[in-house]
Amino acid sequence: MLRIVTQMIEAEAELRRISERTQAEQHIHREATVREILQSVRRQGDRALLEYTAEFDQVELSPSELRVSGAELEAAYQAVSPQLLTALRLAKERIEAFHRQRVPSSWVMFPAPEIILGKQYRPVDRAGLYIPGGRAAYPSTVLMNAIPAQVAGVPEIVMVTPPGSDGSGGKGVNPAILVAAQEAGIQTIYRVGGAQAIGALAYGTETIPKVDVITGPGNIYVTLAKKQVYGTVGIDSLAGPSEVLIIADESANPIHLAADLLAQAEHDPLAAAILLTPDPKLAQQVQQAVATQVEAHPNRLLVEKSVANYGLIAIVPDLQTAAALSNLFAPEHLELQVADPWALLEPIRHAGAIFFGHHTPEAVGDYLAGPNHTLPTAGAARYASALGVETFLKHSSLIQYGPMALREVAGAIQALTQAEGLPAHGQSVQLRLEEDRS
């Protein structure tokens, strides 16, 4: 049963508990296991990948089978429906159009005579995308990770995903994933998952090249592996279980709200589904609608566990209080199902993605609206943003001073170098000035 709370102290406590739900999952023994896996992959390369794939995925591979073959890529198109192919192409078009809107450009400025300053943006040389397997296949995640990398101009993009995601229990990869990858311009795909796949991308093996940036969500072992290799490579984020927070008033449809909450709960037993509303009648209606819809859900046990542990309805005094509680939680997905959703935007400070109105369920953003669905979770929206083109870019500062410009700031530089006890810094300026005088 989806719980209803009416006291603000209890609501705040519950939101904190739910936000911190993944911390209990990150036990020390899991971190130690991940560390051992990463060290083995770093030392033994492909051999470690094959051994861990046999142990964790129960799939025996040879080194030549790590990479998905061209024949498999071609055959994947025959295994997906025309409707799915059309949907993937529509999603690709809209995601690409969105991400092309704000590609950073290199620039220079001339703040004073003989001074040039600027930034030069360049993509990383190689990106590695992790696409999870497990409970479902995620072709949409392929598009959301690959397209920003393509728009950024990354020269080489590789993808890893666990074997057996086609449901055969064998070596196959779900054809929808393979088709999505090809539609997004990726031909280099490896059938390996888990922490060992992150290690392969971070350190390189005989078969899998070392990359510069790793993106894509995964289970707790994948997340901990990304955490441990950060610094050796860049990462997008430490993604946790998915979450939605809905702010709704009396104008919302309780059946729709229940469906949106369950759409989140069905992801994972740790997924969070939260409703904040000032309308007690709506709260009761949504609670009943959730109970009714859960009974017919194909994954009823999973959804019941998620709703029971991390589902919540909080009755709040007003929408402004709801916005304040939302900021406390900093949700991955925020739905504003109120009569005037844009009027509520101003007090919202922290959210990965915001969905406005009664006809914008989170599923629109998950698949093909255009904005990325790889979003900060577990409160990270307080300081982090969605995956985007910037994830695959880095910038270099551009600085040029002429003789007169250097002379004008030499005294200030000298004072600072003396304060910091770095005389050679000051000398590097002084020698140039003396040379110019001679």
Image (spheres, helix red, strand yellow):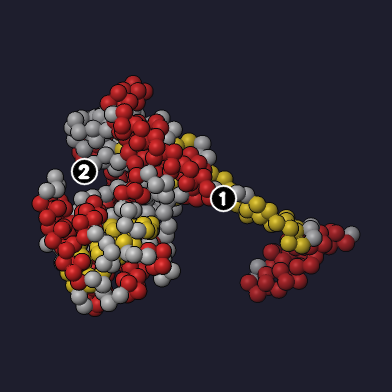
Q: Is residue 284 above or below residue 151?
A: below
Task: State the residue at coordinates (41%, 67%).
Answer: 343
Task: State the residue at coordinates (12%, 58%).
Answer: 291
Instruction: Locate residue 351 relative to residue 111 in the image: left or right.
Output: left
Q: Within 10 Å of the Cα at label 2, are there few (<14), some (14-19), or many (20+) other Cα atoms?
A: few
Report the front residue among 232 and 290: 290
Look at the numbered disc 1 and give the secondary structure of its residue: loop
- In the picture, the quarter occupied by the C terminus is bottom right
For residue 104, the mark is 1
Furthest residue to the right? Answer: 438
Under mark 1, the amino acid is Pro
Task: State the residue at coordinates (39%, 68%).
Answer: 344
Q: Position of residue 404 (x, y in %)?
A: 82, 62
Q: Position of residue 122 (x, y in %)?
A: 57, 45
Q: Within 10 Å of the Cα at label 1, are there few (<14), some (14-19), or many (20+) other Cα atoms?
A: some
Q: Position of residue 172 (x, y in %)?
A: 25, 29
